[in-house]
Amino acid sequence: GLAILIFLIFWFTAFLLGKWQGLYRRFTANEFLADFVRQLVKLAILAVGLVVAFELLDATALVGTVLGAAGLLGLALGFALRDTVENYIAGILLSMKQPFLHDDWVAIEGWEGHVLRLTSRATIIMTLDGNHVRIAKSKVFNGIVINYTRNPERRFNFDVGVSVDSNLAAAQNLAATTLLEMEGVLQDPAPHVDVQALGDFNITLRVFGWVDQSL
């Protein structure tokens, strides 16, 4: 009865610490890493409570047997669930490196959208179409990740066609000046215009400008 009572105390403590999310946010601002630490603490407390309960029952030999069986079972499951284990380890490494945070705008494996959350197996983003896309963590860790939010300044560009008889210098200056007068376009770096293509009937100008996406 005492062993059961002590195990229940450890279980209740693990439950309370698992619900206390603010405690882990004090150690790290990364909510993904904080959630991983929270789960690790819960498992550690439950494991200690189980060992103490077995010690009170004078079942140390049983503890060794259970741990040995758990080790063999874990090894077997590791081979059987290799992809799952790979994704889980990749998630831990991603949480430590922090290539992106919650609500960052990223491009991963050809998918672009806001980061919603990082589960134990996948990174979930929401595209502009409102679709939820799950990308395996191993692909995120080994792939190319473009984080558009990390740098607040972002460049945009568009093409404009002008007549072959136009004064190119005047057209380029007009496009750059017009951009400077538009609200939201940064003056530093300043807009600029390049000649993109020469055609038989028109000339294509490519206009570049910068905006502060944090505003």
Image: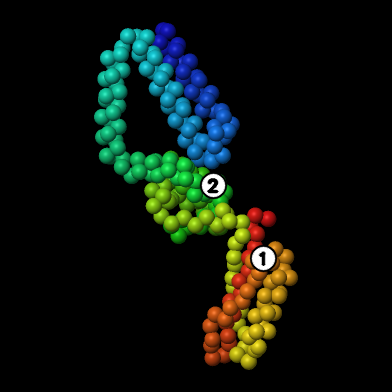
Residue at image location 62% in from the left, 88% down from the top:
163
The relative height of residue 79 versus residue 125 in the rendered view (above or below) is above
Residue at image location 49% in from the left, 38% down from the top:
33
Q: Amino acid at mark 2?
A: Leu
By what rule are the colours in the image chosen?
rainbow
Q: Residue 101: image x %, image y %?
A: 54, 47
Answer whether labels 2 and 1 touch (C-beta < 8 Å).
no
Residue at image location 43% in from the left, 27% down from the top:
43
Q: Which residue is mark 2?
A: 101
Q: Is residue 108 left or right of residue 170?
A: left
Q: Residue 190: image x %, image y %?
A: 66, 69
Can residue 130 be seen in this snapshot?
no
C-alpha gap between disc 2 and disc 1: 27 Å
Q: Secondary structure at mark 2?
A: loop
The relative height of residue 8 versus residue 98 in the rendered view (above or below) is above
Q: Which of the 4 quarters of the picture holds residue 211?
A: bottom right
Can residue 190 be seen in this snapshot?
yes
The relative height of residue 19 versus residue 184 in the rendered view (above or below) is above
Of residue 57 and residue 152, the one placed in the foreground of this image is 152
Are there few (<14), some (14-19), or many (20+) residues within 10 Å of tag 2? many
Which is more N-terminal, label 1 or label 2? 2
The relative height of residue 142 versus residue 167 in the rendered view (above or below) is above
Q: Is residue 71 left or right of residue 48?
A: left
Q: Secondary structure at mark 1?
A: loop
Point out the frontmost of discs 2 and 1: 1
Of residue 165 and residue 191, the one placed in the foreground of this image is 191
Q: Is residue 215 left or right of residue 13?
A: right
Q: Which of the 4 quarters of the picture holds residue 56?
A: top left
- Quadrant for the C terminus, please: bottom right
Q: Which residue is mark 1?
A: 188
Of residue 27 and residue 144, the one placed in the foreground of this image is 27
Q: Is residue 45 left or right of residue 115?
A: left
